[in-house]
Image: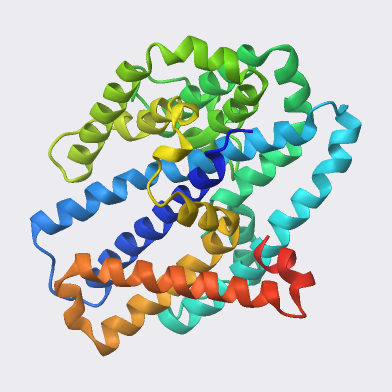
């Protein structure tokens, strides 16, 4: 297993915290009719936010890689016995923190749903849209692992083609033509949008683990052009985000191209690598808690100290620091307490 992977998971959850801090603080400005940030500062923040589109692809790539590593040498039947703990650790914390989130938005926004509405929210992944697609791939992984061992390139290609088809269904005509109406049957309920964005990454992680050395030999010689293309896509995606151009494919393509570079990142070249490795160990719990904490913090700031929103960048830094310390403190406390046996049920 590549030594840089734990740190990459930490970087991904760090991007999630930054992304949510920016998005929720900007939403709060609109919600409470606070003074708008300058176009320059907003553009700067949106440029940082755009890096966050890499977070879920990194998580799925790493999840696929670790799952394939775990399933190595296992039959499909043995694989299904092995994934049961992974499913439990994914689903139980998800339900717990979703319920807490629904309680928080009731207190803060007076947002309520019917019983059917809450069940629907859980099924579609509101607000944790990463979880349904993770559960989907965990359920599929024993079969996917078996198929990937026999046909690795075909597996990745099929997921990529399917993702392209879904993209043209979600955004009709984005590829220059429109599918007939009956094609919507290939877009599944609940998972249609997540698969449009992220279908290929889990399978890519599985395929990479099987043939990592061969992969590095093939793509190592073209890593510099891939880096340049990835950077160009980022610039275009940021330009679209701030309204300078219209090119919808840039944000969709950016993580697909950038994921090709993950295996070439050297652990020793990652700044603050131990910090990010520590975050990576707690990423699933932080993923659930960060949204709740940031939601509460921006609400409190808006009501108690709204002036801070005039310096949005400073607010984002404060939100991120508070979120990091609160989440890691809570997880460490439980881990060291007599109730540590419940850690997996709460934080995954």
Residue at 50% in and 78% down: 104
Say which of 236 and 74 sits in front.
74
Instruction: Work out whether 119 lies above or below 300.
Output: above
Residue 300 in the figure: left or right of residue 243: right
Residue 2 in the figure: left or right of residue 292: right
Instruction: Work out whether 254 lies above or below 331.
Output: above
Percent coordinates x, y for residue 61 in the rendering:
56, 35
- The answer to whether residue 55 of the structure is visible from this angle is yes
Q: Quadrant of the C terminus?
A: bottom right
Say which of 99 and 287 sits in front.
287
Residue at 63% in and 77% down: 333
Residue 133 in the figure: left or right of residue 197: right
Q: Residue farthest to the front?
A: 268
- The scheme the figure's colours follow is rainbow
Quadrant in the picture for residue 255:
top left
Percent coordinates x, y for residue 127 in the rendering:
51, 60
Instruction: Work out whether 5 lies above or below 42.
Output: above
Residue 52 in the figure: left or right of residue 305: right
Residue at 74% in and 12% down: 150
Percent coordinates x, y for residue 334 in the rendering:
67, 76
């Amino acid at each position: 297993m590549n030594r840089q992977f734990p740190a990459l998971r930490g970087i991904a959850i760090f991007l999630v915290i930054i992304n949510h801090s920016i998005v929720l603080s900007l939403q709060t400005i609109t919600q409470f009719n606070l003074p708008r940030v300058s176009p320059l500062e907003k553009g700067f923040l949106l440029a940082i936010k755009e890096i966050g589109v890499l977070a879920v692809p990194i998580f799925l790539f790493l999840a696929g890689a670790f799952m394939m590593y775990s399933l190595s040498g296992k039959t499909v039947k043995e694989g299904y016995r092995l994934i049961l703990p992974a499913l439990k650790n994914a689903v139980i914390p998800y339900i717990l923190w979703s319920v807490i989130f629904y309680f928080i938005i009731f207190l803060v926004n007076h947002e309520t749903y019917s019983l059917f509405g809450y069940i629907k929210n859980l099924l579609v992944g509101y607000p944790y849209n990463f979880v349904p697609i993770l559960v989907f791939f965990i359920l599929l992984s024993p079969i996917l692992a078996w198929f990937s061992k026999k046909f690795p390139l075909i597996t990745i290609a099929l997921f990529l083609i399917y993702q392209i088809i879904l993209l043209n269904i979600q955004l009709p005509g984005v590829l220059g033509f429109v599918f007939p109406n009956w094609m919507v049957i290939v877009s599944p309920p609940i998972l249609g949008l997540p698969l449009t964005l992220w279908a290929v990454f889990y399978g890519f992680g599985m395929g990479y683990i099987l043939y990592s050395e061969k992969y590095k030999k093939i793509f190592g010689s073209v890593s510099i052009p891939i880096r340049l293309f990835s950077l160009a896509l980022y610039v275009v995606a940021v330009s679209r985000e701030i309204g300078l151009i219209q090119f919808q494919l840039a944000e969709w393509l950016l993580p697909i191209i950038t994921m090709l570079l993950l295996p070439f990142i050297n652990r020793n070249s990652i700044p603050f690598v131990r910090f990010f490795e520590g975050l990576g160990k707690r990423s699933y719990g932080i993923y659930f808690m960060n949204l709740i904490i940031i939601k509460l913090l921006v609400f409190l700031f808006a009501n108690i100290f709204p002036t801070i929103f005039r310096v949005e960048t400073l607010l984002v830094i404060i939100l991120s620091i508070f979120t990091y310390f609160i989440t890691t403190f809570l997880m460490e406390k439980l881990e060291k307490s007599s109730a540590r046996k419940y850690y997996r049920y709460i934080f995954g």
